[in-house]
Image (tube, rainbow, N blue to C red):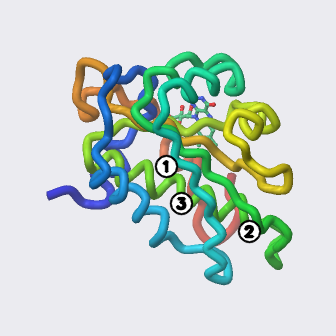
């Protein structure tokens, strides 16, 4: 039985996938539930998740995503968008980027629990992605989540990237960095 922290540690960016392996509808729906049950500012829930299963579309997305060629071998690609982008929180941050990012993060964790690898993409040309996927101009694409089974290994065998020491990222009581 995994704890939440176990899953957080299990998730890694996977950039090489088992070709032609599909994610079952059951698993895909479970991953999407991870988004649907995410928190959002004022509970707006303005997640527009465009799920792409067509392999030909993956190939078209490669140049739109700065030639990140591993996308072509994905099992599924989710363009995580928002159509309601006006609300600025009191703190000054736009709610939609935060809300969509939480949903993407949760989906990546649910995927990890299912042994499915993912890679969050921020390196993409939004206009070109919109053109490929027929996304209206007023909609913003916050992130692209690429999903697939790690090539030739289990997710637990994918190498973990380094993390900063806790002292570098945490300060108590007063700003101490
Ligand atoms: C906002 C964001 C944007 C990212 N963009 C890309 C990307 O375009 N291409 C890519 O291969 N990885 C991308 N990544 C993955 C990071 O490089 C990765 O999370 C980081 O190196 C830590 O490794 P890990 O995910 O294996 O723990 C992105 C991650 C985040 C959170």
Q: Which of labels 1 and 3 is toward the front?
A: 3
Residue under the point 71% across and 26% down: 64
Residue 169 image point, x, y percent:
58, 50
The quarter of the picture where residue 44 lies is: bottom right
In the visual, does 170 lie left or right of 108? right
Q: Marks 2 and 3: in contact by CB < 8 Å?
A: no
Find residue 95 and name its label. 2
Quadrant of the frame with the N terminus: bottom left
Task: For marks 2 and 1, give the CA distance.
Answer: 28 Å
Residue under the point 43% across and 59% down: 32
Query: Quarter of the picture for ligand 1?
Result: top right
Residue wearing tag 3:
103
Residue under the point 32% across and 40% down: 23
- Label 2 CB, ligand 1: below 8 Å? no
In the visual, does 134 lie left or right of 138? left
Please, what secondary structure does the residue beneath circle 1 have? Answer: helix
Residue under the point 28% across and 45% down: 24
Find residue 77 and name its label. none
Residue wearing tag 1:
166
Mark 3 or mark 2: name the one nearer the start of the chain: 2
The quarter of the picture where residue 12 lies is: top left
């Amino acid at each position: 039985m995994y704890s939440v922290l176990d899953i957080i540690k299990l998730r890694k960016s996977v950039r090489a996938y088992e070709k032609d392996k599909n994610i079952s509808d059951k698993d895909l729906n479970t991953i999407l539930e991870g988004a649907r049950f995410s928190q959002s500012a004022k509970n707006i829930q303005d997640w527009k998740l465009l799920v792409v299963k067509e392999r030909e579309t993956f190939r078209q997305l490669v140049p739109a995503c700065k030639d990140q060629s591993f996308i072509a071998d994905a099992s599924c690609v989710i363009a995580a968008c928002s159509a309601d982008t006006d609300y600025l929180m009191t703190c000054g941050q736009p709610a939609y980027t935060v809300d969509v990012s939480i949903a993407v993060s949760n989906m990546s964790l649910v995927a990890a629990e299912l042994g499915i690898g993912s890679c969050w993409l921020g390196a993409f040309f939004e206009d070109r992605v919109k053109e490929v996927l027929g996304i209206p101009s007023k909609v913003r694409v916050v992130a692209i989540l690429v999903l697939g089974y790690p090539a030739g290994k289990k997710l637990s065998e994918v190498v973990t990237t380094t993390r900063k020491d806790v002292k570098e990222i945490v300060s108590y009581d007063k700003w101490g960095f």
